[in-house]
Amino acid sequence: MKLRSRPLAGLTLRARLIAGLLVLFTLASLAVGLATALALQGYLLGQLDRQLPTAIAMSVSLEHPPGPAPGGGSRAASPCARANQNPALAAGQQPGTLAARLTGASLAFACIVTGPGGLSAARLSAADLAMLRRLRVGGPPSTGDLSRLGPYRFTTFRGPDGDIHIAGLPLDGVQATVRRLELIEVIVFGAALLAMGLAGVGLIRLSLRPLARITATAAEVSSLPLGRGEVALPQRVPAADPRTEVGRLGQALNQMLGHVEASLAQRQAAEARLRQFIADASHELRTPLAGIRGYTELALRAGDDLGPEVRSALSRVDAESARMRRLVDDLLLLARLDAGRPLDRAPVDVSRLAIDVTNDARVAGPDHRWVLDLPAEPIVISGDEHRLHQVLANLLSNARSHTPSGTTVTVRLAGRSGGVELQVSDDGPGIPAGLQDQVWERFARGDSARSRKAGGTGLGLAIVRAVVAAHHGDVSLASQPGSTTLRIWLPADTPTEPDKPA
């Protein structure tokens, strides 16, 4: 199932705090603005509701407006026209005040105040009449819209003769006042929101400055080579108030860095003791091994005085002591490289080196097919010729020992990126993917994937990687069934380093 990404997942803590602050302020502003507008609207409607009784009184007065005595021609005029003869009826009424009278289902009259003391007949549509008929008689004031006059506040009153008097006051003034208030609130709250955002950015940036220092310290520590060698951690987070969250975080990080530094120091001391032990043991083992080999060779010179079984046993002792001597030499070399002992630096003709080592491998493995691919011009770099010879010899020995007869081994040399690239490829069974990261380790074996006809120390590729690293080069492996390639890149000029004690 695909997880939905959260909207704020990609934002920083600073952005989230600022966004949260602005959202909260915006919501508070909307709530205040809405409450203020509703309160003002309610207050203004209350004012209109208190004026509606006087409008009802005008409607009742219009039912029998004063005029000439009965029998005069003016009685035939509309109530609105006859009411104009008595300006006192509309006195005090605001322009737009509506007074109407319903008799049954018909409209008796509908007059609207046009000015001080002036009335005129209101033109109402069928929809307006239907709306007026739906008004609740004697109920609380209500609001409705007239097609030509706009929104009104209405109240109704039933007269003694059963007719219905309707009075209405226009809501244009109320709505205009509320809209003006809303506009003012938008401007004021918008300016306040902008000021709040700018102030919030500064305040949050100032508040998170200690956290930024913690992040910078952690980044510095993460960039240090903690994997090997002696590592010091002088980086610490500046002290902050421990009563704050950032202060407690800084203290925890400093404490953790202290523990890490102590652990690294203990590891370095243990590695130094182990390297020293290996170096000392290798030195000490050389002497008895030399004695064993010397006495063995002396005994083998006895000729016919030895029986075949004794001679065979002595030959095995000599072979195994030679093998152990090679193992001791390899361990001593690794111990010296781990200790940072500098290698010899001299011009090395890598092309000649590849030719010599490949010829040696061709003699040692005649059942393999050896191919040499060299550039037209010799390639010369600065390095330790003896150790580079050992690197290439180990690679070819591995290719010969761990591939079946008839395998083609190709040694390819090419200049690249200010240095030289050396490739040793074979078309053997390959190395399983699960073992490719382990072949560089000491005493690593790949017997489960490759047939092994001759025993080995398991230090060959470890020495290759250590010597290449001492030359400031790089080594890599790519393998699959039918193709295995080891690539070594060495710089043309190895940087010089100060000598270190053994």
Image (cartoon, grey):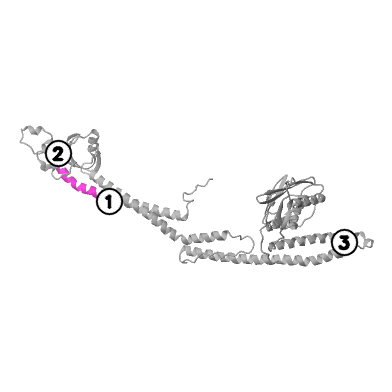
**Looking at numbered disc 1 in the image, what kind of residue is underneath it?**
Ala
Q: Secondary structure at mark 1?
A: helix
179 or 477, which is in the foreground?
477
Question: Label 3, label 2: how many angstroms apart (C-alpha)?
Answer: 141 Å
- Percent from the top left, x then y, of residue 462? 71, 57
The residue located at (25%, 45%) in the rendering is 176
Task: Assess whether residue 59 is covered by the magenta stretch.
Answer: yes
Q: Specify which label sits upstream in the sequence, 3 or 1.
A: 1
**Residue where numbered disc 1 is placed:** 39
Other residues around mark 1 within 10 Å, as few (<14) / some (14–19) / many (≥20): few
Q: Residue 387: name its quadrant.
A: bottom right
**Looking at numbered disc 3 in the image, what kind of residue is underneath it?**
Leu
Asked if the residues shown at circle 3 and circle 2 are in contact, with their CB atoms under 8 angstroms apart, the answer is: no
Q: Specify which label sits upstream in the sequence, 3 or 2.
A: 2
Task: Assess whether residue 149 is covered by the magenta stretch.
Answer: no
Question: Label 2, label 1: how many angstroms apart (C-alpha)?
Answer: 33 Å
In screen coordinates, is 499 left or right of 257? right
Can the viewer see residue 382 in this picture? yes
- Percent from the top left, x then y, of residue 35? 30, 51
Q: Which residues are magenta?
A: 43-60
In screen coordinates, is 305 left or right of 284? right
**Residue where numbered disc 3 is placed:** 314
Q: Which mark is residue 119?
A: 2
